Image: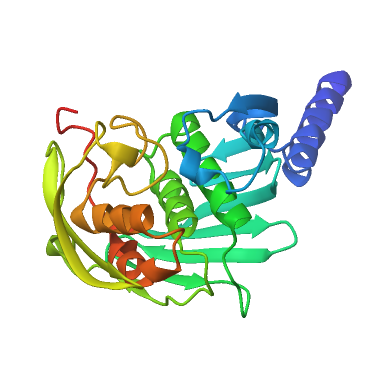
Amino acid sequence: MRRSNRNAALAVSALLLSCLVPAAPAAAEPRAIFNESQLRLSVDELASADVPKGLDSATAAALRNVSLRLRQDKGEIEGTLRTGLGEVSFHSYTVGAGLVHVEYDVADRGRFELAVDNDQRTAEPSYPKGLRITNADRFLFRSLAFVLERKIGVDVPEAAALVRGANLWGAHPLSPVQFGRIAAPDVKSWTNLCGITSATLYHDGSGHGLIGENLATGPNASNCRSRCGAGCNAILGTSAWTVDCGEHDRCEQHHSCCVSCQDEFNSASDDYLFASNCRLSGW
C-alpha cells in the first residue's frame, strides 16, 4: 500500500513538472531553396543591345556568363546575381494584401526600390539621390530579369514584382533618373499587342519631331519589338507586349541609347509593371 501511494505521488509530481517545462518547439518547415549553390548560367539569348557598346567580343562574351544564388520562401524571394559588370542583390517580399516591396542593392551604386500596390496599380520608386543610369546598370537589371523569369516564373506577387521591376530599371535611359510615382488607374492605361504582329508606333527624339511607322511587333519582330522587358520569349516571364513598350523600343533603335527616349520610357513605365500577361495569346 505504501509503495502504491509512493508511486502515485511520483506520477503526480512528474505530471506537474511536465506542465512547468515548456515543450520543445515544433520543427520549422524546411525553407524552399533553389540554386543555393552557385549556378553557372549563360544568357546568350539577351539581345546584343543589352551588352554595353564598344567592347571587344571576348569581353562581351564574358559578361554574358553570370552566377546566381537564389532563395525562395512563401511570400519572399532573395538572392544575388553576379556578372562581369558587377553584382546585384535582390529581395522581394509581400507586406500585405496586394502590396509588395522590392529592393535591388547594386554594388557601389546603392539601393533601387519599388513599393508596389497591385490592387491600386501604383508603384513608388526610390533610388540614390542624383543617380544616373549607366550601361552597367541596364545590363545588370536586364540580365536579372532574363534569368529570374526562367527560374522562378511570375505566378506569385513577389516574383512578378521582382521580375517586372528589374525589367523597368533595365529599360531606363542612360540619364539621371527622372521618374516618380507610377500609376495605371485602369486597364485602358495600356494597349496590349497580345498575338498582334504589327502596329503603328510613334516616337520623337532629338533631331526630328513625331514619327509614326507601321512596324512588325511580337516575338518575330526586329529586336522583339514591343516586349516590356529583356529577351524575346513569349511564353516565360511576364511576357507583356504593348504599344508603349513598342514605341520605347523603336525610339531606342533610332537613337544611340537613348537619352532622347525619356518620354517614351515614362509612358511605358506602367506597362512594365502592370500590363496583363500575353502568355495565353497563342504565341
Q: Is residue 152 left or right of residue 106?
A: left
Quick check: 1 above or below 239?
above
Whether residue 280 is visible to the viewer of this picture, yes or no, is yes
Q: Say which residue appears at 74% left-offset and 43% top-offset.
A: 22
Residue at image coords 80%, 33%: 14
Q: Nearer the viewer, residue 279 or 242?
A: 242
Q: Is residue 179 left or right of residue 24?
A: left
| Quadrant of the snapshot with the C terminus | top left
Which of the image's four quarters has the N terminus? top right
Q: Is residue 255 above or below residue 152?
A: below
Does residue 123 appear anywhere in the picture?
no
Determine whether, in the image, residue 270 is placed left or right of residue 77.
left
Q: Locate residue 211, reporting x and y percent.
A: 19, 65
Display coloring: rainbow
Residue most extreme to the front:
207
Residue 141 image position (x, y, % from top left): 54, 50
Q: Quadrant of residue 252?
A: bottom left
Name the one closer to the observer, 58 or 112. Answer: 58
Picture coordinates of residue 159, whole percent (x, y): 44, 44
Q: Residue at x 62, y 80 (%)?
A: 129
Number of numbered discs present?
Answer: 0
- Is 69 on the left-hand or right-hand side of 12? left
